[in-house]
Amino acid sequence: MSEINNNINYEGVEEFDLATYCEDAYLNYATYVIKDRVLPYIGDGLKPVQRRIIYTMAIEGINSKEKKKKSAYTVGQVLGRFHPHGDLACYESLVIMAQNFSYRYPLVSGQGNFGELFNPKGFAAMRYTESFLSPYAKSLLRELNAGNVDFEPNYNGDEKEPVYLPSLLPNILLNGTTGIAVGMATDIPPHNVNEIVDACCLLIDEPKSGLEQVMQYVKGPDYPTGAEITNSYQELYEIYKTGRGTIRQRAVWHQEKDQIIITELPAQSATTLIPKIAELIQSKKTPQIEDVRDDSSENEVRVVLQLKSSRVDGQSLMQQLFVQTDLEKTQRVNLNMIGLNDRPAVKGLVEILNEWIEFRKIIVRRRYEHRLEKVAAELMRIAGFLIAFNNLEQVIAIVRNSEKPKDELMATFSLTEEQATAILDLRVRNLAKLEEQALRKQEQELLKEQKQINSLLASKAKFNQQVKKELLAAKEEFGNPRLSKLVEREAAKPVEVQEEISQEPVTVVISKQGWIRCGKGHGLNLENLNYRNGDEFAQMLECQTTDTIYFIDSTGRSYSLMANTLPSMRGYGEAITAFFKLPDQASIRGMFTAEPKQFVLLSSTSGDGFLTEVENFETKSKAGRNVFTLKEQAQLLAPIVLPADFSLEVENGKFECLPITNKGRCLKFEVKEIPSRAKGSGVKLININSKDFTSNQEWLKYLFVVDLNNSLQIKNGSRKSNISVNDLNKVKSTRGNKGRNIIKGLTDNSVILIK
């Protein structure tokens, strides 16, 4: 903690400035979490707890199946010697390093239940499992005692532990890691040994190579569970350039008759996959799937989707599942790590590789320098042995008779303390067996090695080639083929999969209070239907079970649903509000079926209206979509569906609009004069004085679509009157005119028929 202004008050209590103390304490905590708990070190790619587990297993000799020990023993050693934290957290870290579906190259091997792909947290307690170091862990430990890493005291100063491990390979990229610290996080995806080593060799030979050249070798991440990576090259380029982004993974599958077999899954997707698909089946959102089951074994993923029919379109179904489940999953990328400067930073791919190569060069150089020290010490020891051999009797006499043989040997033969100690450590019989020729031969071999090492360290080119040679040897030992295929695809988009519905005629009925029901067949006797008290028949529609029914309410909002989803004629049906969320006091003004490109004529009592295509009524929202905006006091009239052969280029006289007000004023004009739009308040169909409309004197009451040969019949009770074709054609004009009053005696009960 940095220095804080404080003092001791008269009660002997130490006082601090609260703001400064809190800021300093939080900063220390954040630094500790970032550096000592969460972020990996670029050199060995490990977090402290992982490094301590690996190191403990190494020094305890738990490095093969024959030398395995209970995981509880390993965890106990780690906690007691290096990592004074929770045992369960430590054990979980060990388990994850042993899971071949979590680590691309597992560092630990185990015997017992270490979890499985669909239940990674279901591992057995540490007292039941046994663990040992995996073969790949050798890449981290092989050079541990070669004098090329620094050691530091453990938490209580009893032992020393390595600051980092001398990794032969860029484990930071090969296994990746995830973690959340204070104010930052890390998400490093795993990669393939062969690709990463080839990229390192490129940068050793050509240090100025850019990301384009590196990506000729590093195609993308390589996840332990396989699956396709669907990002484009440009997307991957941006991820590797900035160190941030998102990887898209998609499951690998194929169809066998009435089954879809899934063989590879995105990373960390298996846990919720089968329950989610089962939920979709139960909620009937995937009607083609009859059942889902897990036929996976220890070494093979096999999720089976049992289809209801072999005719099911597997592509469309899987497209839906890619959207609704983790069969397509995004993996966050955040290449955040502790660098060689001991500071956290987000780095690009080229920067990571160059920095790791620098780390590896430091390791190799320190290893050779340490070896030089060993060789020099051995040469000095041999020189002392040669002196002893040439003066064997005198040496034996000094050892036998002197009280301080070391000092006398050093003084008599000008030996160093190390040489004298080495001579005294030899048994007399070994001293007698020393042969000058053997010593000279050993000396020559060491001098030759010393010369080679000095030459290697003095030549940058030779040194780089040695680093490269060791990388290629590690690649040969630990490399394997890529698991995740790169297949560029767009992200999955929702595709509705319809259940195979048999086409049958049905009749839909809505009551005035908004209860809806559906009966099989056409031409039903609706007089026998029962209604709730005070309710009665309002509308009916004859259609097919495969039809989409479109509705519009009194506020101008549209809705749609499939006819086969409606309740049967038994009872009173269901309230329309069970299907749609109608505005307050709203009611259904009309319902119809039509092709998506057919036109519908919408109008209101204010004399306004417009044409719109049926597809503009389509919506999946229970709240509907706004189509017609009503003016104040205006009410929506029933929609008129125009025949399929209507178009805006149709010949004159075939489709004519006939609006009629409550006062009998009529106007006739071509329907194609009405503009088509997706939504709005419409245009004037017939001109009604605004004062007359707002005072309820006149409004649009009837709207018909006729042709030039139609006439009208008006019924007022038993009295009938006719408007001839000639009389109707006399009011023909253009849209928006006032028209003429040619119908007399209209009442609220008048009925107008087209003849």
Image (cartoon, helix red, strand yellow):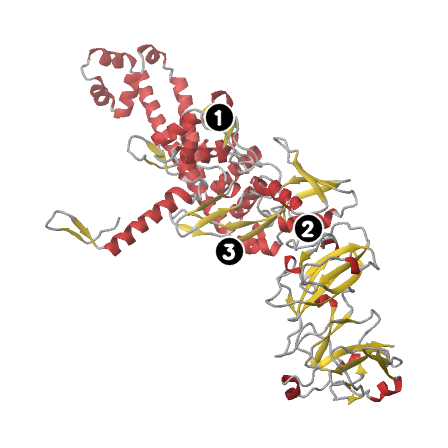
Residue where numbered disc 3 is placed = 242
Q: Is residue 343 left or right of residue 632?
A: left
Residue name at image x 45 percent, y 38 percent = 456
Instruction: Say which amino acid is labelled 2.
Output: Gln
Residue name at image x 69 percent, y 72 percent = 678
The residue carrying pointer 1 sits among few (fewer than 14), some (14 to 19) or many (20 or more) residues within 10 Å by Cα, namely some
Q: Is residue 296 above or below residue 588?
A: above
Give how far across and how far down residue 487 sits, in percent.
66, 49
| Upstream in sequence: badge 1 or badge 2 | 1
Instruction: Say which amino acid is labelled 1.
Output: Thr
Q: Between marks 1 and 2, how big is the CA–CA gap?
A: 41 Å
Q: Is residue 138 left or right of residue 612?
A: left
Residue where numbered disc 1 is placed = 129
Instruction: Say which amino acid is labelled 3.
Output: Thr
Does residue 210 show up? no
Question: Which picture quadrant has residue 78?
Answer: top left
Which one is in front, 171 or 686?
686
Q: Residue furthest left?
A: 10
Q: Which mark is residue 319?
A: 2
Question: Which picture quadrant has residue 42?
Answer: top left
Secondary structure at badge 3 equals: helix
Secondary structure at badge 2 equals: helix
Give how far across and how far down residue 355 sits, in percent.
45, 47
Which one is in front, 18 or 203?
18
